């Protein structure tokens, strides 16, 4: 059964509105609501003239970027009708009937268009060619809001690399280097050499690289309800669009999973499916409290050993672990432990203490997963190791 994002957001708001959650849980829930209600933000950056507007039009499958000149920020979002507005240096904002009315000193233009591709995501084109102070401020604005970054370039030279160095590593893990105007470089016989020369920096700084002939990609979609499959593929447009929207889909699924886990934890919403680690069965022997807890602690340790083996097996090939996947596995393990310790005997202080620790750890995992970074993944693994040590210390025999 599929639950729309708006329905999940409404159920979260109902849970938060009851006012019986701890402050940390309340803030996590509010952050989840914001994530569900906001589109995935795709930020397109790069030097002036690198084809950013054309790339956004290509990804949206329609001409959605208005001709407003080099404003610092140009946002394109989905909506029921065509609207355009601007925000000026003095803090004022106004609606425009035409992009040509955009006044001098405009800091941001927002274009709303009813395009299907914009139902789950929005685009922001960032102009970094202004004065240094303005460029720094615009870059910080973009970093704070971006979920995915596309850096458009023909060269990715030293100045661009210096600017890119300011982007946090966790955002670089969701970023693509896009070699625009690849057809020109191919005709000059330098495209392969260019790609090879960038291979090392791409491996360190980006998720991957895509060469694209944007004009041909747009031409492949020029006919209504028809795409020229051969041109669409050869232009590089298909590969890039598939990769970008796959990241969008993964992001939305992660948001849904986080919301379901939050509701399951704090609202008892067990009918909503979520990826959960199987909870091992506990055979309760009728021989007293110590025997019950011996079974409980053994099951908890077995669960943690299995999760550790699963993580190690997935990185056995020498590849760096995927932080998102590690976080998801830690969340599943923490939730399974919390459910398992629900069987703890209420008369045993040690078991009750571990029950409280397991529940608190499950809550902390939600925060780590919201951060989506390597540091958060490392913290999540460390938290599970601490739980394992506590359980080992309390184990009977």
Image (cartoon, rainbow, N blue to C red):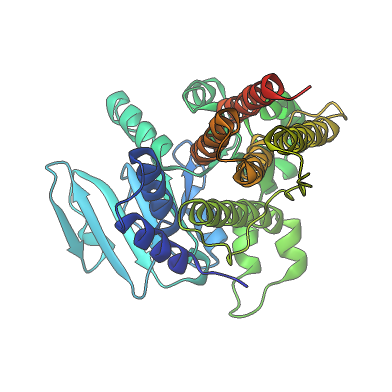
Closer-to-camera residue (132/253)? 253
* Res. 129 in view: no
The image quarter containing residue 391 is: top right
Total marks shown come to 0
* Res. 216 in view: yes
Farthest residue toward the bottom? 225
| Residue at 34% in and 45% down | 73
Image height of 102 relative to 131, above or below: below
Where does the image place residue 169, in percent across and percent down from the top left? 56, 27
Farthest residue toward the right? 317
| Residue at 43% in and 67% down | 6
Where does the image place residue 351, in percent across and percent down from the top left? 60, 33
Image height of 97 relative to 28, above or below: below
Closer-to-camera residue (218/123)? 123
The image quarter containing residue 194 is: top right
Farthest residue toward the front? 287
Where does the image place residue 156, in percent across and percent down from the top left? 58, 29
| Quadrant holding the N terminus | bottom right
Q: Would residue 94 appear left or right of 125 to someone viewing this image?
A: left
Closer-to-camera residue (256/57)? 256
Where does the image place residue 29, in percent across and percent down from the top left? 40, 49
| Quadrant holding the C terminus | top right
The image quarter containing residue 330 is: top right
């Amino acid at each position: 059964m599929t639950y729309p994002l708006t329905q999940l957001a409404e159920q979260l708001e109902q849970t938060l509105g009851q006012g019986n959650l701890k402050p940390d849980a309340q803030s996590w829930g509010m952050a989840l609501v914001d994530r569900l209600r906001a589109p995935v933000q795709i930020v397109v950056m790069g030097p002036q003239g690198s084809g950013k507007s054309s790339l956004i039009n290509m990804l949206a499958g329609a001409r959605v970027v208005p001709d407003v000149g080099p404003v610092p920020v140009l946002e394109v979002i989905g909506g029921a009708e065509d609207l355009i507005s601007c925000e000026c240096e003095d803090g004022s904002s106004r609606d425009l009937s035409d992009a040509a009315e955009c006044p001098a000193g405009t800091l941001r233009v927002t274009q709303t268009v009813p395009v299907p591709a914009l139902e789950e995501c929005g685009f922001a084109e960032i102009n970094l060619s202004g004065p240094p102070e303005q460029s720094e401020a615009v870059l910080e604005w973009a970093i704070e809001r971006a979920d995915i970054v596309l850096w458009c370039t023909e060269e990715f030279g030293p100045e661009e690399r210096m600017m890119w160095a300011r982007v946090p590593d966790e955002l670089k893990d969701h970023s693509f280097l896009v070699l625009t105007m690849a057809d020109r470089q191919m005709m000059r016989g330098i495209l392969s050499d260019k790609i090879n020369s960038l291979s090392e920096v791409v491996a360190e700084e980006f998720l991957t690289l895509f060469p694209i002939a944007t004009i041909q990609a747009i031409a492949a979609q020029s006919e209504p309800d028809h795409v020229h499959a051969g041109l669409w593929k050869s232009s590089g447009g298909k590969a890039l669009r598939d990769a970008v929207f796959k990241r969008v889909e993964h992001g939305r699924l992660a948001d849904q999973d986080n919301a379901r886990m939050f509701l399951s934890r704090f609202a008892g919403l067990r009918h909503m499916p979520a990826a959960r680690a199987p909870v091992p069965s506990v055979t309760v022997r009728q021989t007293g409290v110590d025997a019950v807890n011996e079974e409980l602690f053994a099951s908890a340790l077995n669960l943690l050993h299995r999760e550790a083996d699963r993580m190690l097996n997935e990185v056995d090939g020498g590849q760096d672990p995927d932080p998102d996947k590690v976080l998801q596995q830690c969340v599943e393990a923490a939730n399974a432990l919390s459910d398992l310790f629900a069987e703890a005997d209420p008369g045993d202080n040690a078991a009750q203490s571990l029950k409280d620790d397991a529940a608190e750890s499950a809550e902390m995992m939600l925060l780590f997963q919201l951060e989506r970074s390597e540091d958060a993944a490392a913290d999540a693994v460390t938290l599970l190791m601490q739980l394992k040590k506590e359980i080992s210390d309390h184990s009977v025999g």
